Image (cartoon, rainbow, N blue to C red):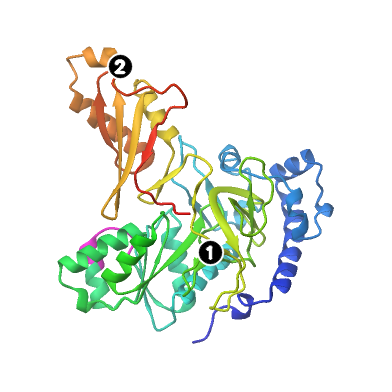
Amino acid sequence: MKHYYQPEIETMPVDQLKALQSERLVKQVKYVYDNVAFYRDRMDAAGVKPEDIHGVEDLHKLPFITKDDLRDQYPYGLLARPLSECVRIQSTSGTTGRRVVAFYTQNDIDLWEECCARAIVAAGGSNEDVCHVCYGYGLFTGGPGLNGGSHKVGCLTLPMSSGNTERQLQFMTDLGSTILCCTPSYAAYLAESVEEHGLRDQIKLKAGIFGAEAWTEEMRHDIEQSLGIKAYDIYGLTEISGPGVSFECEEQQGMHINEDHFIAEIIDPKTGEVLPEGERGELVFTCITKEAFPLMRYRTRDICILSRKKCSCGRTHIRMTKPLGRSDDMMVVKGVNVFPSQIETVLLNEGYPANYELIVDRVGHSDTIDVKVEMSQEMFDDLKTTTAEREKKLIASLKSMLGITVGVKLVAPKTIARSEGKAVRVIDKRNLYQS
């Protein structure tokens, strides 16, 4: 197999890798200072000039940015290239009407697809494979990223997108799919469908690359056994590029971060202090090769641990654990970012009191999300509109906001228990994050 990239980058000695990061960081800091007023103002306010940054050892001098900054600068405030040089956008699902839109030059797309290609190679992929991509396409980064990565490896690429399971199974068997790319919950559903249709002996899958939602080791083992594959984790954020920021190798002991493109830090989420390797804290990324939408010291809110322990695969790039939790209140449900504040916004807009309980669970390998909501006394006494009609309308409003269906149960006033301290609005029964 002829590699599309220089494999020595992934096995580069750490001191050389750090030197490469430093060189790229110095150039990137000057680049964003000169081309993005937001960064220039932030750095000036922090008393930092580009000439103060000599390498990765000075990264801590730069100010953080957050998702709120990205929303506030929507759509063009963080753009570092003229629109005429941008060839694509990708976008998050959006919260309270404010989306995060990421811009890409052609070079950005090429580098992103290379990162995804590395993930496919790490899962055993080559130009002899049939890569079955059923992440969503469109604004969601999953489909486009793995699709492009598959092309770079030279796989026969099946751009299936999500849904239409009958067709998924037909192409999987007829074309001999060997690598499956999708969310872990959809992989579990496909496994059930394969079993129901008696197709277990007709599929040729050997590996799966699964991400976009949290999943447990137990779920990994179930999928591996039911499909007869090895299941690999992949991590990314739309803001940073998409999937392929990091990925698992055959060891399955954490995800290698593509350090020639992204510098990772772990900080104390309360103080912002940079923590040493091996400490648990909030993951922060700095993009050192992005052109159109380069983020510097971006706080992901994901809690994890970094380790440079020697890996048997030969890759020297640092590894991150699966996210062990969040430093904010965001949940990932069915692959969609959900904030309780979104739920509350809809309820208040529809005239409901801010007394509710949000219950997230997992039945089999599928997420469920339900909200129990108190009616106001006026609603409860109104005989013209039935409770079922109100629930139907609220379900539609929540789906419009979140993009997924939320079960709704309306209850009488003052029936949800009050708390004397901080109200417990969310009950997540999935136990997705493991220490």
Q: Residue 246 bears which disc, if any?
A: 1
In this rendering, the count of numbered labels is: 2
Residue at 43%, 45% (x, y): give it.
Answer: 93
Q: In which quarter of the image is residue 308?
A: bottom right
Secondary structure under the numbered disc 1 in the rendered image = strand
Seen in the picture, residue 212 relative to 36 is either above or below; the reply is below
Secondary structure under the numbered disc 2 in the rendered image = loop
Seen in the picture, residue 18 relative to 69 is either above or below; the reply is below
* Residues at marks 1 and 2, CA–CA distance in whole angstroms: 47 Å
Q: Are marks 1 and 2 in contact (CB under 8 Å)?
A: no
Residue 403 in the image: state x and y as whole percent.
Answer: 35, 43
Q: Decide if residue 403 is on the left or right side of residue 304.
A: left
**Residue linked to disc 2:** 376
Q: Decide if residue 378 is on the left or right side of residue 145.
A: left
> Between residues 280 and 189, which one lies in front from this camera angle?
280
| Magenta residue span | 160-168
Residue 280 in the image: state x and y as whole percent.
Answer: 58, 53
Question: What amino acid type is highlighted by mark number 2?
Answer: Ser
> Between residues 327 and 27, which one lies in front from this camera angle?
327
